[in-house]
Each structure stands twice: as C-alpha cells, then as structure tokens.
Image (tube, coloured by chain):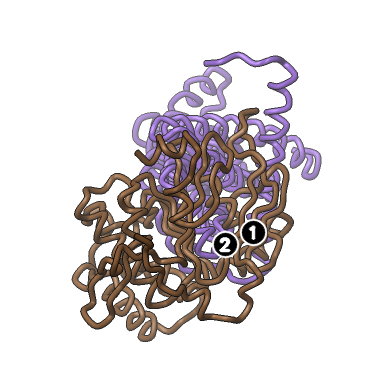
Chain colours: A purple, B brown
Amino acid sequence: MSFVSPEVFAKQKIAALQDYSVLAGRSISNLFSRPIYWADIYTQMDSIGVGSLPIVILTGFFTGCVLALQSATALEAFGAKSKTGSLVALSMVKELGPVLTGLMVSGRNASGMASELGSMKVTEQIDAMRALGTDPIRKLVTPRVLATVFVLFFLTIISDAVGIAGGALVGVSLIGLNASSYLHSSYNGLVIGDIAQGLTKPLFSGFIIATVGCYFGLKTTGGTQGVGRATTQAVVVSSVLIIVVDFLVSRLMIGIFGS
Amino acid sequence: MTPDVTPSPAAILTPDTDQPVVSFENVSIAFDGKTVLQDISFEVHQAETRIILGPAGGGKSVLMKLANGLLKPDTGTIKVFGEDVTSMRERDLFALRARIGMVFQESALFDSLSVEDNVAYRLHEDGVSIEESHDRVVEALHFVELDHAITKYPSELSGGMRRRVSIARAIITKPDLILYDSPTGGLDPITSTTIVELIVKQRDVSHTTSLLITHRLQDAFTLAMSHFNQATGKMERLANEGIDDSTRFLVLNEGKVIFDGSTLELVRSPDPWIKDYLS
C-alpha cells in the first residue's frame, strides 16, 4: 500500500464522492427518459429478491427466536415477561428487520454487483458497451438500483414477519407464554409510526447497496485482484453506510412520529 | 524494380475525400502524471486503412479509445466525421458511435450472452425485429466463417473465434469507420492470417475506413501488399510486389508520432529507429 500526502488523499476522496454522487444521480434520472431496460429490471428483481429469500428468512427467523429468548429472561426480572411479544415485534419492525435484511442483502448483492461489473470492467466489456452505443449506467446500474430498492422493501416485510413468528415459536414452546397473548401483545405494541419507520429504512438501504456495489464495480482497476478489492470495499462501505443511515432515518422518523 | 500501386478506393470514391474521417490535432493525454500520448497529429481519410505500429506501451490502444470518445484527451482536438468528440457529451457520442465499429484487444464479448446475442447487440438496442436481426447475424457470421458458432457462448470459443465474433459484431451495422485494436494479438500465425484476411476482405469489399493496431509487422505488410479476390474468395498477394495505396502507416514510440506515411515511405525511411524496428 502506497502512502500519499494528506492533500492528495483528500482530493482523491472528494473526487470519489463526486463520482459516486454523479453515478447515483444518473441512476435515478435515467428512470425518467428512454430507454428503460425493463427486462434487466425484472431479471435483477429475481436475482436479488428471490435469490436473497433463504438468507433473509433464516436470519429474520433466528433473530426473532434469540430476541424472544434473551428479552424474556430480562423482562422476567421486572415481572413483565408477558411483554416479550411486544418487545420482539418492536425490535424486529423498527430496527433488526430492516438493518439485518439490509446487511444480508448487502453481503450477498453489493458484492455480487461489484464483482460482476468489476469483471466486465477489467475485460473491457463496459468499454465495448459504450462503443456499441449503450450507456452502461442506464443498462447496468439503473435496473439494479430500482430492483434492489423495490425488493428490499418486501424482503424487510418478510423478515419482520418471520422474526415475529420465530419469537412466537420460542415464546410459546420454550418460555411457556400463551400464543394468543403473545401475538396480541405484539400487535398492540406496534403503531403506524413504527411500521413507517421500519419500512422507510429499506428504501435507503436498497439504494445504498446497489449504488455502492455498482460504483466500486465500475471503478475497478487492476485485473482479478482489483475485482476482489472492489468486492470487499463494496460490502464494507455499503454495510457501514446502512448502519449510519439507519441512525439518521431513525432520528428523522422519531422527529416526525415522536416515538 | 518499381512496385505496382493499385488505385485505392479512396482515389475512386470522390465524395468528401478532402474531409478526413478521423483527425487528431496536437492531442496529448497523461495518466497519473505520466504522459502516454504527446502532441499527436494525423488524419485518416475516406476508405483509408491506417495501420498503427509501435512497441507495446506506446499509447496505441489509448489512441484508439480516444478516437471512439471512450477517453478524453487532456489537450488537443479529435474530430470524427467532422464532429469534435473531445467536446461532445456522452449522450451525443452514443449516436456518433452508431457509425463506428470497434474490435477490442481481448475481443470484449459479453460473456453472459450467446454469440448470436453478442453479434446482434446493437440491433437489439436499435429495436430491430428478431427475424431481421437473426438474418443479419447469420450474414455477419458467414462473413467471418463462423456460421456454426451462432448458439455458442464466448467461453466455448477459442481466441481466434472470439476475435472473429468481435469482428462480426463490429461490422453488422455496416459502420463507416472500424477501429481494430490488436485484432491478431496473442493469436498463432495461422489464426492471425485468417483475421488479416477478414480485415482485407472488409477493406476491399466494403471499402470501410479503418484504424488498425498491430504489433506484428508481418500482418501489417500482408495487409499492405494483399487484396481480396472476390472471384476466388481468397486473399492474394498483389501482382509484381504491388502495394495497396489505401493502406498507410502511423508509427508511435514513447507516445509520439515518429512516422506518418505510405508503405513505401515507411520501408524507405532513413530514420535509424524505424530501420531498427522494421529489421
């Protein structure tokens, strides 16, 4: 790794931020002009959405399970074990569902996008696409951004649902809670603001995953080693951004809904 | 003995022969502070085949990408079909590139698409019907003698076959300018000759203006001293050591043009570096 002066380092980072902003902006603006590659959008929805279902379901389910197990033990000390359902539902819908789904999809798809586009970049396929008169951002980035934002919304709902179900299963079978009161507590614990907060986050996370994955892919240099580097960077940067943006959106939504 | 010179299509085709198809004026470009091309100026005219020679790392591929607007120079002006590609927006360049075919150094085929979809890529983008695009793909693949490979994927093809598919993809829309970036690079001599024959065929049948990079002097001189006989369907040496005068040379070394002229001028150049390079 070569060291550069602080000035050069700062310039590089600002230039990278500028490039990322241009890419992200164009990926959105392309939706308002022709051509729109609908076939690529549906292919990406299938690849990202259906392909990520198993990991999202497994993660959501076992997160709900462990959350019920841990929170029941803690709540018992205050005589509030019956509130386990409410705590699991709130945690899943507001935080863990959106964040863990985002991180899982990021690990699977930001890396996939970076490696796929990176391989295309180092084998000159991106240049070939431009030489053949196609805008690579319109053809490759916009479909991935739209597909990721769209499917992550529904994957988060699925994750929330299986998380609450997993919590219920543990609550009933291991902790000895009543199924009806558990679900009643879960339902009563949620208000519209919680659901709005939980379903706003995947819109941002989806955008981050796709734009960061595509950005690092399209910036790949240095052959196969460069592809590996781009893949790692895409996962790390998108994961950190998801958590940072999660905090900012939470603060914003608490400001709007008050809880 | 004075070699016979075949009249070039450039001499036969009168329209716009004064207006260069490609013109570089004082073009320079550097990457990370390292100058790759310095003060490059040359012109390529209608129906001319311009062979770009020079050692590896001399900026030839960069020059090709500049001609297609894939890179922007730091200084200088590049005009293609009279339009200044250095100041054009990417969106406008896409329209200009519809008139340009490009064969990449490593073919750059889309590995997730079949040969048919690769060759028909531009037609699909233009909304050409499936039937028409299929017919045109068959015609283009027949030109490069790869009719049997239409359903294959790039990973199933040899290096030479990939290069031929890349040529088919470049010529399917009958472009006015073809850019060949080392079309014979990394290929064995027999396969290289097959590729050179296809380029000569394209030059002599369609009279398409082209820029061609090669490291192989043998390929360059085969191009300059051969023609395609449409009656026999074969590439043949021009009679009496003849030279095709539509084929001209540009020699680059360390990012600078050190020769710009005809085949005869090249072989008779007194420049010691060129003499050494050609020997």
The residue where tag 2 is placed is: B44
Q: Position of residue A203 (x, y in %)?
A: 62, 49
In the rendered structure, which disc, 2 or 1, sits on the residue that comes first in sequence?
Answer: 1
Q: Position of residue B82 (x, y in %)?
A: 68, 67
The image quadrant where one finds the N terminus of chain B is: bottom left
Residue drawn where x is 53% and y is 80% of the image: B13
- Marks 2 and 1 share the same chain: yes
Q: Between B140 and B35, which is closer to the camera in this rendering?
A: B35
Judged left or right of residue A32, residue A134 is: left
Q: Amino acid at mark 1?
A: Ser
Residue A60 in sight: no
Assign a secondary structure to mark 2: strand
Residue B179 in sight: yes
The image quadrant where one finds the C terminus of chain B is: top left
Judged left or right of residue A208, residue B3 is: left
Assign a secondary structure to mark 1: strand
- Say which chain tag 1 marks: B
Q: Mark 2 and mark 1: span between their CA atoms? A: 6 Å
Q: Amino acid at mark 2?
A: Val
Q: Position of residue B190 (x, y in %)?
A: 19, 54
Q: Which mark is residue B237?
A: none
- Say which chain tag 2 marks: B
Compared to A259, does B217 lie above or below?
below
- Are the residues at dot 2 and dot 1 in contact (C-beta closer than 8 Å)? yes
Judged left or right of residue B279, residue B74 is: right
Compared to A229, does B202 lie above or below?
below
The residue where tag 1 is placed is: B23
Residue drawn where x is 63% and y is 35% of the image: B30
Residue drawn where x is 48% and y is 26% of the image: A72
Q: Position of residue A236 (x, y in %)?
A: 52, 29
